């Protein structure tokens, strides 16, 4: 047997509210979603969480819809900051962080976050 697995593991864990919403929207968009419910069997989990898989044939559309629904930011859209640092007032020019106090001017999501890498690899940012 050769060939790639038909399913892609999405590297996030969703709570039941997120999952039910995602599942409903993706179903109506005809993007099949496969999921596994986790817990609450173990002591560490009080509630049921979900991990989801996209079908490889629908990876791009699934990733784009997921990114839109979950409002996943695009770290590549970050731009360096020029102006007075909002924290300490130091003048900066095209800086990613304040040279004086260290305040980061980036958005909250790292470019190498597993979810960002996953979505980018499968066309979610196209
Ligand atoms: Zn500063």
Image (cartoon, helix red, strand yellow):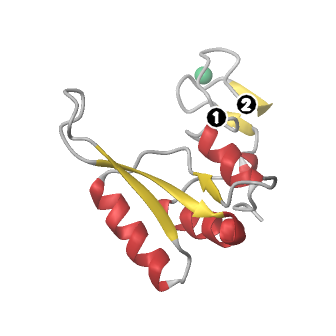
Q: Are marks 1 and 2 in contact (CB under 8 Å)?
A: yes
Instruction: Specify whether 101 is left or right of 70.
Output: right
Q: Is residue 5 above or below residue 45?
A: below
Residue at image location 52% in from the left, 59% down from the top? 71
Please identify the quarter of the rendering in which residue 58 is found: bottom right
Residue furthest out toward the front: 1
The dot on residue 105 is 1
Label 1 lies in ligand 1 vicinity (Cβ under 8 Å): no
Q: Nearer the viewer, residue 66 or 82?
A: 66
In which quadrant of the rendered image does the C terminus lie?
A: bottom right
Residue at image location 59% in from the left, 15% down from the top? 101
Q: Nearer the viewer, residue 69 or 4?
A: 4
Residue at image location 72% in from the left, 38% down from the top? 81
10 Å neighbourhood of mark 2: few (<14), some, or many (≥20)?
A: some
Q: Nearer the viewer, residue 114 or 43?
A: 43
Instruction: Specify whether 48 is left or right of 22.
Output: left
Give the image location of residue 112, x and y in percent: 69, 35
Instruction: Specify whether 114 is left or right of 33.
Output: right
Give the residue at mark 2: 96
Indicate the quadrant of ligand 1 in the picture.
Answer: top right
Q: Is residue 25 above or below residue 39?
A: below
Give the image location of residue 12, x and y in percent: 49, 45
The dot on residue 42 is none
Q: CA distance from mark 1 to mark 2?
A: 5 Å
Q: Nearer the viewer, residue 79 or 37?
A: 37
10 Å neighbourhood of mark 1: few (<14), some, or many (≥20)?
A: some
Q: Secondary structure at mark 2?
A: loop
Please identify the quarter of the rendering in which residue 122 is found: bottom right
Q: How many tags in the picture?
A: 2
Give the image location of residue 27, x and y in percent: 46, 79
């Amino acid at each position: 047997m050769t060939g790639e697995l038909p399913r892609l593991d999405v590297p996030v864990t969703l709570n039941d509210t997120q999952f039910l919403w995602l599942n409903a929207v993706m179903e109506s968009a005809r993007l099949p979603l496969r999921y596994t419910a986790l817990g609450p069997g173990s002591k560490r989990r009080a509630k049921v969480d979900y991990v989801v898989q996209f079908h490889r044939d629908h990876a791009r559309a699934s990733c784009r819809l997921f990114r839109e629904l979950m409002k996943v930011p695009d770290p590549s859209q970050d731009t360096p900051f020029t102006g007075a640092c909002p924290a300490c007032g130091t003048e900066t020019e095209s800086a990613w962080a304040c040279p004086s106090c260290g305040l980061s001017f980036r958005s909250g999501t790292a470019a190498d976050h597993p979810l960002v890498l996953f979505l980018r690899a499968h066309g979610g940012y196209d």
